[in-house]
Image (tube, grey):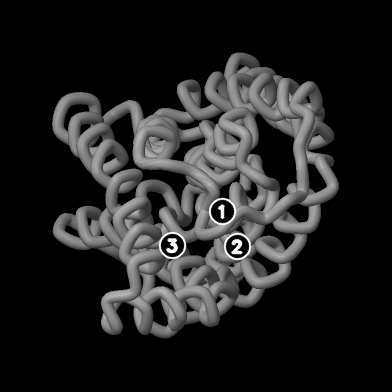
Amino acid sequence: MSDLLAVIILGIIQGVTEFLPVSSSGHLALFQYLSESLHEDLSLSIAVHVGTLFTVIFYYRSDLMALIGGVLRRDRDSWVMANLIITASIPTAVIGLLFKKKADWILTNPLVAASCLLITAVILYMSGRISVYHTQAPGFGIGYFKAFIIGIVQGFAVLPGISRSGSTIVTGLWLNMAPHNAARFSFLISLPAILGAALLEFLGAKTTINVSQLMVGGVVSFLVGLFAISLMVRLTLSGRLKGFSVYLCLVSFGFFFCYFTGIGENLL
């Protein structure tokens, strides 16, 4: 596989999986295991993550502008919303740094990724048992304790295979958030998480891929991400996240088969 084609495929994978509840980190870990040309290329991983960072900024640009404007005007509701995002980001950062310092090998291990995909499948399957309501409460409809809980869940989503969007949205629904607010809060708290992870990886990034190809990967992940985030919001509102559990089981068991039969490494 050529580097450019692999970059485009990886950009598509990141754009789709960052927002749909199937774990971008899990799919990237599996894809990099299967693809010799992109194995452990951290700078490319950063590029496609930054692409999806801009997807969130663009999709929620009205919310972000209103939030920033409200904070500057010292509007109470805006300050509360900003503090909820900060509250959720604190445990995410702590847990993420602990994994980075103490067990960095876990974050790129394909066997861990395949196993965690099964955990995400269970989480999504259980979402079908949640009775959701559609009343949009002021702000995010939660307090600081619930925001902190969601932040803890997002922190453990640093594990490859644990869907960040899926786990945080389902947790929000379990905490009685309206679907719209659960999705909005999940994607807004992803901004500091994605940015922080990208900055950490940037410090040690090495690449064999040229700048133009990195830009291609970022643009592809941004454009594909716009479609995926819109679809994810609609699926959350309609309560149809459960169906992804079947797909995750197929991917996980398919990878285990390739891995243990010896036909998987550098397959692409």
In the image, what residue occupies the spot 72% across and 21% down? 126
Crowd class of label 3 (few under 14; some 14 to 19; many from 20; radius 10 Å): many
The one of 201 and 19 positioned closer to us in this rendering: 19
SS at mark 2 in the image: helix
Q: Is residue 79 above or below residue 165?
A: below
**Which amino acid, by three-letter code, is at mark 2?**
Gly
Tell me whether circle 1 and circle 3 mark residues in contact (CB < 8 Å): yes
On screen, residue 122 versus residue 222, left or right, reads right
Residue picked out by circle 2:
15
Tell me whether circle 3 and circle 2 mark residues in contact (CB < 8 Å): no
Q: Is residue 171 above or below residue 268?
A: above
Crowd class of label 1 (few under 14; some 14 to 19; many from 20; radius 10 Å): many
Query: First in sequence: mark 1 or mark 3?
Result: 1
Which numbered dot is residue 49? Answer: 3
Which numbered dot is residue 94? Answer: none
Residue picked out by circle 1:
18
On screen, residue 255 versus residue 36, left or right, reads right
**Which amino acid, by three-letter code, is at mark 1?**
Glu
Q: Is residue 119 visible?
A: yes
Tell me whether circle 2 and circle 1 mark residues in contact (CB < 8 Å): yes
SS at mark 1 in the image: loop
The one of 218 and 39 positioned closer to us in this rendering: 218
